[in-house]
Image (cartoon, rainbow, N blue to C red):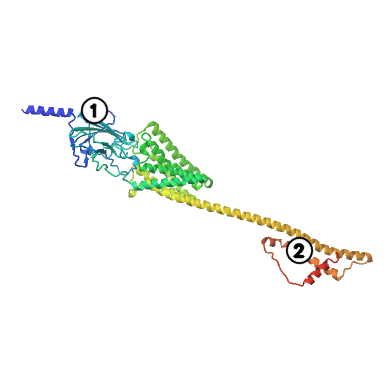
Amino acid sequence: MAERFSFLLTALCVLSIFNGLGQEVYDLDPAYPVHDLDKYLRVYEDRMENLSPDILLQDKNDLEFMEGDKLPRFLETNVPYWGKLRIRALDSLKGWTLHLEDKMIGPPVWTKSNGRVDVYAYSGRTLLFHQKTGVGVPASERATDYSWMLNSIRLEDLPTDEPVTLIIRAEGNDFGYPAYFNLNARSPDQPYYHQINQFHHGFNTFMFGVTFIIFLFFLLQYLYLKDPVYFWFSLWLFFCTLTQAMTIGLIIDRLPSWRYPFWFITANGIFFTFWFFGRAFVGSKQKFPKLDTFILSLALFVLAEIVLTALYVIFFNPDIHFIEPGFHFQLLNIYTLGSLIISVILCLKKDLFARYFGVGSLIASIFLVIGTLWSMGWIIPPFKLDPYGTGLFFQIVLYSFGMAYRSQKINESIQQERLNATRSLAEIQRMKDLDEVKTRFFANISHEFRTPLSLIQGPLQQAKKSSANSGGPILIGQRTYDVIKQNIGRLQTLVNQLLDLSKLESGTVHLKLQQGGLIQYLRSLVYSFESVA
């Protein structure tokens, strides 16, 4: 009797294994809105990628598995995993969904989601459905229309009161984040396991809006003014805007095959455009030619690294580990060190624009150092702040005011130049008027010289003619002597006026009025011309 019972038990076990019943079945009662299923999940590592739903349905004892509730915090990156779960719906599951919960809180949204999840539902060996989810799956093929960050499938097609085997294949995303399961079934009343973009979502959304508005403003400024500094600032803001858009989950899910290269070029494009903007803002090519060579070399260095790394990723499809392809973050730290050195040098310059830009660059470099060390897993940022987003926020605010300040200073300089030009024109006009005054002065004074000379020459010739007739010495009368003396004094006055020409240029010559007898003045004039008459 005992032998027969033992044989029967063995036969039942073999039959159970053959039929896939060796794994415990979870009864899913719709009366409870949320069911944690990890305890009933088996997870299989598929490093060689040789597993399939058919193999897992056979429930072979030689397959090693991990219990779903005892998985490590992170599975291996770039390795696909399979999960097997047996459930039985006790009632209709209309509106119910199965979620793979992402418990990694903190990284930006672009790191979210499994790359691809395939869920096969079997009743015995009969395939009930095959649903897909994950960011690597085109939106039209995803099982649910929830946010792409939430991996979920529909459970409403499961039969009632019948054991169903779910075979789940999950692979990590193309940003180098590992696959995850964390299974739970949820009713339509509680469709989400957490708020979408729960970490710094408000700040990042605010940053996107502000960055986009500032970008449009300075782009219009460039289109109107054609100033190169507005072009480079707008281009830098363009990369900042795209990066912030990806931070809140926009754009990045629309590029299943090009997500990582697009993100890599865009997010890192901030670095080289920043220094091209700095060159235009400071005017380093004209002011500091040697320093400008180092700034240009730094910008070209990071640009070359971005392009080469992106091409390497596109054509060689390397394994990416938590965002990093190879030595990118190490090279980024070299760039950051160069930025710090140049920032300090700019801060020490006496030029106002150089100091302003240097302070902003110094702040950005400090946050970048914190961010790269955070990305490499070496530190945890203080106050749980996103160092990249925070540093970018300070930069945008600082340089937006800086652009306004620069425009104000340039306008003041232009106004000063216009004022100087107006003063120069006024000085030229004054010199022209002064030349005209001098010309008139010399013409008038020439006539003035001729008059007393003629009045002196006349009496002398008359006296010489009288002495020639008499043959005696030349004698002049008292009146003639007075006329000659008066005109000699007049000549001396005219000569003094010529010597006082410098006073005329300085504006110190003034009209002197004197009151006297009109008859006596006219008499002296008449007597002066008597000899000529």
Verify CB contact (< 8 Å) between mark 2 and mark 1.
Answer: no
Q: Is residue 197 visible?
A: yes
Query: 354 or 480, which lies in front?
Result: 480
Query: 196 or 503, which lies in front?
Result: 196
Q: Secondary structure at mark 1?
A: helix
Q: Is residue 351 visible?
A: no
Residue type beneath disc 2: Leu
Residue farthest toward the right in the current orientation of the protein: 470
Residue 296 vertical position relative to residue 120 in the rendered view, above or below: below
Residue type beneath disc 1: Ile
Q: Is residue 159 left or right of residue 459?
A: left
Q: Residue visible at 68% across and 60% down?
A: 505
Residue farthest toward the bottom in the current orientation of the protein: 517
| Residue at the disc numbered 2 | 494
Residue 225 placement (x, y as % from top left):
51, 46
Residue 410 placement (x, y as % from top left):
52, 51
Residue farthest toward the left in the current orientation of the protein: 1
Locate the N terminus and report the quarter of the image it occupies: top left
Q: In the figure, residue 144 lies in which quadrant?
A: top left
Q: Earlier in the sequence, mark 2 or mark 1?
A: 1
Q: Is residue 221 left or right of residue 35?
A: right
Q: Residue visible at 36% across and 48% down?
A: 203
| Residue at the disc numbered 1 | 55
Q: How many marks?
A: 2
Q: Residue visible at 62% across and 54% down?
A: 424
Q: Is residue 410 left or right of residue 181?
A: right
Locate the C terminus and report the quarter of the image it occupies: bottom right
Residue 430 vertical position relative to residue 204 in the rendered view, above or below: below
Q: Residue visible at 76% across and 63% down?
A: 494
Query: 267 or 234, which lies in front?
Result: 234
Q: Secondary structure at mark 2?
A: helix
